[in-house]
Image: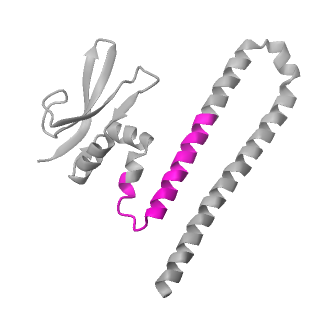
Amino acid sequence: MATRIRLTRMGRRNRPYFRIVVADSKSRRDGRFIEQVGFYDPLKHENRVNIKEDRIMYWLEQGAQPSDTVKNLLSKMGIMLKWHLRNCKSEDVKKVEIQKWEMAQKAKAEETAKESKDKKTSKATPVKEETETDAPAEKETADETVSENVETSAEETVVEEAIEEKAEEKEETAEI
């Protein structure tokens, strides 16, 4: 039986939420399903997605194909990355890749937080003051971006060095 991991719509008019279910590919969108593996509420900001990761991995192993929307949700949560790394020979490589992904997610979250703060402060200040203080603000933001780039590149080099060291250790043990 061809199975799909997809969304079924629930809720009332103008207040939708979705169940993430495993269903036969030939069944209707809101029809019969095999197992509910999570839910997605697009209107909430906190706890927007709740997924049983172990069940998702089980169904992916069984050959279930996620729909495009579910695939995007799983990618944002890092489950698709874990799925693609499952056949990786080394556990160390898996851990490093997941750490890189987590660091990238943290950087994105910090960046969006800074942008939202900047938007709030720019709305609160009058227009005349912005033109006078525009040049120093640009210098500060340039300095901040340079320091952020240095920090992220330093973190990346540390991770890369760790990978190289582990690879060298494995080569040495293989030679012995």
* Residue sitting nearer the eye, 34 or 14: 34
Q: How many marks?
A: 0
Place residue 91 in its image quadrant: bottom left
Q: Residue at x 65, y 60 (%)?
A: 157
- In this rendering, would 31 be left or right of 73? left
- In this rendering, would 139 be left or right of 44? right
Main secondary structure of the magenta stretch: helix
Q: Residue at x 39, y 52 (%)?
A: 82
Model colouring: one colour
* Residue sitting nearer the eye, 111 or 163: 163
Point out residue 129 in the picture as x, y percentages from the top left corner: 85, 16
Q: Which residues are magenta?
A: 83-110
Q: Residue at x 54, y 42 (%)?
A: 105
Q: Residue at x 25, y 49 (%)?
A: 58
Residue 136 inside the magenta-drawn segment: no
Above or below: residue 68 compared with residue 42: below
Place residue 86 in its image quadrant: bottom left
Point out residue 46 in the picture as x, y percentages from the top left corner: 46, 24
Q: Given the current orientation, which residue lies at the most extreme bottom position?
A: 176
Point out residue 84 in the picture as x, y percentages from the top left corner: 38, 56
- In this rendering, would 26 be left or right of 150? left
Residue 85 inside the magenta-drawn segment: yes
